[in-house]
Every structure is written in structure tokens, then in C-alpha cells.
Amino acid sequence: MIVDAATPAGDWVLSYDGFEPEQEGLREVLCALGNGTIVSRAAAPNALADDVHYPGSYLAGGYDRLATTIAGETIENEDLVNLPNWLPLVFRIADGPWLRPGDVEQIGYRQALDLHAGVLRRVVRMRDGDGRVVRWDEERIVSMHAPHLAALRVALTPENFSDPMTIRAGLDGSVINWGVKRYRELNGRHLETLDTGAVEGDVLTLRSRFVQARREVALAARTRVTAAGGPVVPARIETLANQASHEFDVAAREGQAMVVEKIAAYASSQDKASSEPLLEAVKHVRRAGPFSELRAAHVKAWAHLWQQADIRVESEADQEAQLKLRLHIFHLLQTASGHSVDRDVGVPPRGWHGEAYRGHIMWDELFIFPYLNLRLPVLTRALLRYRYRRLDEARRLAAEAGLRGAMFPWQSGSDGREESQRIHLNPVSGNWIPDNSWRQRHIGAAVAYNVWQYVEATDDRGFLRDYGAELFLEIARFFASLAERRPDGRWGICGVMGPDEFHTAYPGADPRTEGGLDNNAYTNVMASWLLTRVVDVLDLLAPDDRARLIDRLEITDAELALWTEISRGLFIPFHDDGIISQFEGWEQLKEFDWDGYREKYGNIQRLDRLLEAEGDHPNHYKVSKQADVLMIFYLFSREEIDEIFHRLGYAFSPEQIFRNIQYYGRRTSHGSTLSFVTHAWVLARSDRQRSWALALQALDADIADVQGGTTQEGIHLGAMAGTVDLMQRCYTGIEVATGALLFNPRLPEEMRCLRTTVRYRRQVLDIEVDQERLTVSSRVMTASPVVIAYRGHARAISPGQSFAFELVREVKPDRPARESEQKRARAEHAEEQARDEQAGPESPSE
């Protein structure tokens, strides 16, 4: 599948040889092009939406809400809208049919995505029923330089005939949301076409409006055809109710290429610094130069991005690791780029690449922001403001629940209301079942954590003053309001769900009326950390700013004292002498027959769906879909964990960390791609071999489509960004602490060297780590010194300086485990690798 990885250019090129219909949906997503404003799937321009192809294009934050009656209930779903299609380009020979992928024999096929340039290339040799062969050479971009523009250039060469040919280029407004099979029973017709037309002959136009949101989106396109060294004038212009097209008649000659350039522009009624959308779209197309100029500016923009974003790894174990890592960075930058800064958008877990999760914003930013904080912090700042703009709606949600502060929804879209489904389809059983995922209140703690991490990395006191502190304090107020005094004198948080998502209620409870669990350990630890950190947030504000904020939010000394009391008194459940219980009552659940179910089903990542189809439920068993308790060890260093548990009054040793990792590692199905990232991270210090193996699984998750069909519905951006952060922070041991950037590298043995660049408090630091040495070099610029440290050896580094640290070799074993435990862990890993990795969709709300 990845055929160029062994060559130098292969570190930048994802390529495919041969057309495979069953793989086309996956390739369309992996080779999708975007710029933070528009993302367009890599469907063939002559393809129609069917079970093989899906030519979807999406506008960042382009949501519309429709109602559907399902299983006797009327439910509303707000979807990321599939925009009118800019791609249509077909041809026919003489009076034959318009030729599409399924109508011809594809005798040669190659598709290559150049990640460094952001250019998609396709070369197809096709033969029609009369034996006539045409070569199709295509280049395509979605401009990173000009955010409204998308363009393609196709050279059509008749190889063995000379006959008249007709080329049709058009716009299609008849599209619907149809890209996720299990959503197809839901209302997906979000667009109404207002008009189609042509401007001065060579520019086609199509104006649409979202049905509920009433947002207008205009699409304009200019097509130019060159043959025999000269331009070809359109022979016909056709405008229908939902479509517009140009037709060009060409006297094709054997061996002579006909060149088609199509430049398209999207404009929206919510664009900044714009007039009416159709006028803007036409203006963008009119002012655009030829494809070669657009391509050159686009390639330069990507080169500048890569100078800031690249991570270089040398690994003997997996020669394709570098390419896969860059693919993940590429899709992250296509989802959130400099063009996102002025848009009111968050960062969705499936990118703007497809219709899975309906483009909603969830907690995956917890895995995405750390990379951006140390690379492109202006993006984190902008994306956090998406949350700030919805703070009033979060306050309203809390008030409706009888609580104070701000309760952020598990799934957020256009206005910040809760967008999670209340019922969802199990594709295994075909049943519509209750969805309790909205009970994941830990989303608010993730927002607060992201605020703190951004401020720590950037020292952006202006953001904290104007936005971040208010977000943080209102979320703290919510968790304090959510906590209840227990009979034992501690505080508890009841009726919630943790990140696991398999467990929605206690065994035997009605999930509709008695859903949720008590004292999810991860939620309570996050609440304790959050309430403790309030003092630090306030201390970072200037006295007058702090006084105004406290007065505006009406925070009293008594309330602050209560927050402190709760932060010290939250209940954390334990069992089996030091194992943190995922939630209160976990130890009473039954152990699960993992071997029996693997033998029965092969793939058991989505146990919830398999069990529901059997009339059973994960609520009865000690099983986890993904990291839950282990998220504590993912987010916090060993020193921070010690501080949190000490403050809570619980004894917790480093040895317990390892035992908890082992305990939950054996009880996790990895039903989410995020799970590979988290487990790789928490094992990085105790079992580097296992950590690297899981990191490689995370790198493969979308490329290999390990969940058996979900990637074609949209990339898993949280997992992609998480693998990038594994390299950037985990294996370099980077920790952003108050006033210092700490390093403690532990590269996997399979990795020879890692080179990365980070921005820390206005300095740009180049970092190189191998198995023996850490080198940190600051680029020449005007900036104050910052403190860097390796294992207590601190240095104040100024721009232009470089420091090298000889790494301390570990004398004792990496982890406190017996040899038998090591062998068992490796055997379990070997068994996992041998099993089929295909699975169903990843979220219970899907």
C-alpha cells in the first residue's frame, strides 16, 4: 500500500498502485486535501456518490440541524454538512456514454499524496468497451495560500485513437449527507439550491442555503480547456435546478494531450471581510491565476508550515514510521491551520474529513492541543476561544441541571448545546438503544486542563486575563457544585460516566432513568486537580484584574474555601490493595471471559455491541473500551500524581502506578484508537518495547483502518495528534512546569534518533535526542532567557545558545516487575498482534 517509504522522497509520499474498489473510501479520506477552512475528499472527479466513492467536501464549522423520527422518537441531529460538489469532470468519446470509474477497465492506476507539497496526483489508464485507451494525469490542491480556493489540472491523452471527445465540467448541488451508513435512516438533506448560473460565459455559479441554519454557501468555478496548443471555447452551458455545467467539444488526436484546468471557490455568509457569498466566490475565481501559479503559492505555504511542524525520527524497526507520522501531522494541519484563527470553530475528533461524529467537538482536543501549544500556539488560543464563546451556554446547561458554574457538553457544535444522541444504532444487532455518553462531565475538566497547559507553555497572561481565567473558574465552580458530601465525610461525584464509555450504569439499572456511575476515579482526580489549581490561576493575574474577575463572577472567600475543602476531600475508590477502582463498585463486577470471546468473535474491540446483540451489557463486567483510570497517568507526571494523592490523603507509590497499568491493560479492549496512544504513553517508562509496539499500532490505526471501515467516515484526529505528541513530548520526556521546560528522554530501543522543534515562551528550541545524548539549541531571535532542565540539571538558555546533556543510563530494570511478569506481558502483546484488528465504529454515540 505505501510503496515509496524506502526512498528519500518516500518519507513524504503516500502512494497506492492499483485500483481497489473496497479500499477507495479509505483512500479518499487519507488523501483528502484541506486548509483549515475547506476539506475535500480525494474522490475521483468523474465519480458519483455510491458504495465505492464519496466525493464529499466540508466547511469548517458548517453545521445544520434536522429532525428525524426513529424508533417512535423524534430526535434532532446537528450535522457537518456535505457541501455542493466542486469536482465533477467527465468525458465521453464521440457519442458514447459519459465515462465513470465503474464504466471502464482501469488498466493502470497510481495515486500519490505529496505531504510536503500538499498535492494529490492521480494517473489512470482506462479502456472503454471499444478498446479505446485514455490516460488521465491529474494534480489537485486545496489551497493553503488562498483559503477559499480548490483547483485541479487534468491532462487527457488518447493513446490509441483519434475521435471527437466531449469534456463536461460542472457543479453539483444535489448532494446529501450519505457518508456514514448507520446515519442513512436519519434526515440528511441539509441543502436547498437557491440558483445556478453562468457569469460571462466561463464561470459557473451555484448558490445554496442550509435548511435550518439558513447559512448561504456559494460555489463558483472556472474551467479552461487547451488542445492542440490553443484554448477551447465552451460549446454548451447547461443550468439545471441543482447543477450547472460547461461542455467542451475537442477533436482528439492520438498521443496529444488535452489539458483541463478547473479553479473553484467556496464562500459563506459567515466569512469575515466579505460581501454577498456569490459575489465573493466569483471574485475569488476571477482573480485566481492559472493552476501553475496557484500550485506554486500553495506549495510555498506548505513548506513554511512544515518548517514549523515537522518531527524527524530514525527507526530501524519500522521504516515507514516517519511517513506515517508526517501523514498524521499533515491531517492535523489541514484541520486547524492559520486560516482557522479567525473562524468560530473548534477541533473535531474526526477532522473536517467526513460525517462521523457529525463534525462535533468533543474531548479529543486534550490529545491535540499539546502538540499545537509547543508548535503553533496561536491555533490553540483561537480554538480555546471556541469554548469561551460558548461559556454562557455552558452556564445555562448547568443551571438547567440545578448546578452552578459552567457545564460543557460532551458533544458541541454550532452554539454549544448538548449535541450527543439520546439513542444510537448498534449495527451488529440493528437495535436503537439509549445513549448515555452525555454524562461524561469530565469534558469540562479537559477544557480547564487545556487552558492551563496553554498558559504554561506560552505565558500568555493576556489570554488568561481576558478568557482563560473565567473559563477555569466557572468550570471549577461547576465541579464544586457537582460534588456531594458523603456519609464518611468525604466528597463524591455521582451519576457520571468516565472516558471508558462501555459502562453507562450499574448492573440491573435502567439506563434511561438510573444511568451513570458514582465516583469515577478519573473524574474525581481531575476535579481535585482543577479545584487545587484555582489558586495558581488567580495568582497569575494582576491584582486589579483578579479583583474585577472575582467581583464579576461573585466568588466569595467562603466559596474559595469550600473549593479547597472539596479538592482535599474527594473520594477515590480503591480495591485489591492499591488498585484504583475505575468507579465505586467496580470490584463487584464479574471478570470477563476474554479468551472465550476472542475465540468466538476474533475481534472484540467493540464488546459493547457484541454483548448488546447477545442481550448482555458491559455494565456487568470488568472491561474497558479505552483508558479511563490510566488517563491519570497520561496527563500527570509521577511527581504530580504523588502531589494529588498526598493532598487527597491517600498513600500512592510509584510501584502502584505500574500495577494499575498492568491491571487495566489486561481488561481493555482498545475499542478506541485513542487507547493505543494512552497505553503507549503510560508504558513509556516501564516497558519501552511494549510502548513502541503500541505506538506503531497507533500510527497504523487509520492507514490500516484497524477498526474495519470507520476511517472512511473521517480520520481519527485525536489519535493522529496523540501519536505525534508521543514523539514530541513523551519520548523526549518534555514536561511544561511552572517557569521551566523539563526534559527526561527515554527513546524506545528501536528508535535511533528523534529531532523536533518546540516553541516555549517566545523561544524556538531545536531538540535532538538519541540513545546517549540530549541537545537543546535556541534559535537566534530577540527573547528573554528560559529555563531548561534535565534530571535536576537546570540551565538558563538564551537565544543562540546550545546545551548538551549526557543521558543517565538506567542501572536497574525499567520497571518493578518480575521476569515472569515481563514474559507474560510480551506474550499478551504477541497474541494481540496475531489477532485480527478489524472492529466496528468507535463511539457508543455512533
Image (spheres, helix red, strand yellow):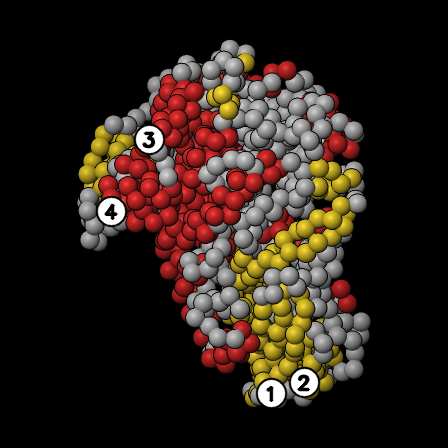
Query: Would you identify the image quadrant in which residue 397 lies?
Result: top right
Q: What residue type is labelled 2?
A: Ile
Q: Are marks 1 and 3 in contact (CB under 8 Å)?
A: no
Q: Nearer the viewer, mark 3 or mark 2?
A: 3
Q: Mark 4 points at which residue?
A: 778
Label 3 or label 2, whichever comes before in sequence order: 2
Q: In this view, does 309 lie above or below 549?
A: below
Label 2 or label 4, whichever comes before in sequence order: 2
Q: Name the residue under label 1.
A: 201
Q: What residue type is labelled 4?
A: Ser
- Separation of disc 2 and disc 1 at Cα? 8 Å
Q: Residues within 10 Å of mark 2 (few under 14, many from 20)?
A: some
- Given the current orientation, which residue lies at the most extreme top position? 577
Q: Name the residue under label 2.
A: 237
- Separation of disc 1 and disc 3 at Cα? 71 Å
Viewer-closest of 620 and 32: 620
Where does the image place residue 764, in percent across and percent down from the top left?
28, 49
- Separation of disc 4 and disc 3 at Cα? 44 Å
Label 1 or label 3, whichever comes before in sequence order: 1
Q: Mark 3 points at which residue?
A: 557
